[in-house]
Image (cartoon, grey):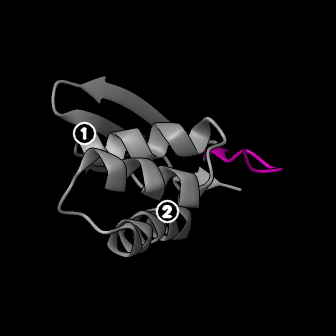
Amino acid sequence: MTDTTPTLGPTVHATATDTGTVLLDERTGRYWQLNPTGAHILQALLDGTTTADIAHALAERHPGLTPEQAERDVTALVDHLHTAKLVMP
């Protein structure tokens, strides 16, 4: 677990769908769609799971995915969510 659990940005709303999660940023009017894996990563992040632990779980779940690639992919998504101000530290 992290010391500071991230939260959705104050103007961001998340809705689960059959194909993942949709985020609406009221500040910009933009919608963001996450596939099931992206939705899982977002939820785990909001639950306080570290990116390393998220990546480890994904690598275990997907045999063709190396832990190193999982770490890069999770970090890239989390960085993108932070840059877009969808998730706040």
Where's residue 1, x and y in %? 72, 45
Question: What residue range appears in magenta?
Answer: 1-8
Residue 62 seen in this snapshot: yes
- Amino acid type indicated by mark 1: Pro
Q: Is residue 89 left or right of residue 39?
A: right
Asked if residue 21 lies in the magenta stretch, the reply is no
Magenta segment main secondary structure:
loop
Q: Is residue 50 left or right of residue 63?
A: right
Where's residue 35, x and y in %? 22, 45
Q: Is residue 56 left or right of residue 21?
A: right
Where's residue 37, x and y in %? 28, 45
Quadrant location, the C terminus: bottom right
Secondary element type, mark 1: helix
Q: Quadrant of residue 39?
A: top left
Q: Which residue is mark 2?
A: 78
The residue that appears at 30% across and 50% down in the rendered structure is 32
Query: Does 36 sit above or below residue 2?
Result: above
The residue that appears at 34% across and 56% down in the rendered structure is 59
Where's residue 28, x and y in %? 43, 56
Secondary element type, mark 2: helix
What label sits on residue 36 in the rendered view? 1
The residue that appears at 75% across and 50% down in the rendered structure is 2
Q: Nearer the viewer, residue 65 or 78?
A: 65
- Amino acid type indicated by mark 2: Val
**Which of marks 1 and 2 precedes in the sequence?**
1
Residue 11 seen in this snapshot: no
Q: Nearer the viewer, residue 54 or 22?
A: 54
Q: Mark 2 to mark 1: distance in Å?
A: 15 Å
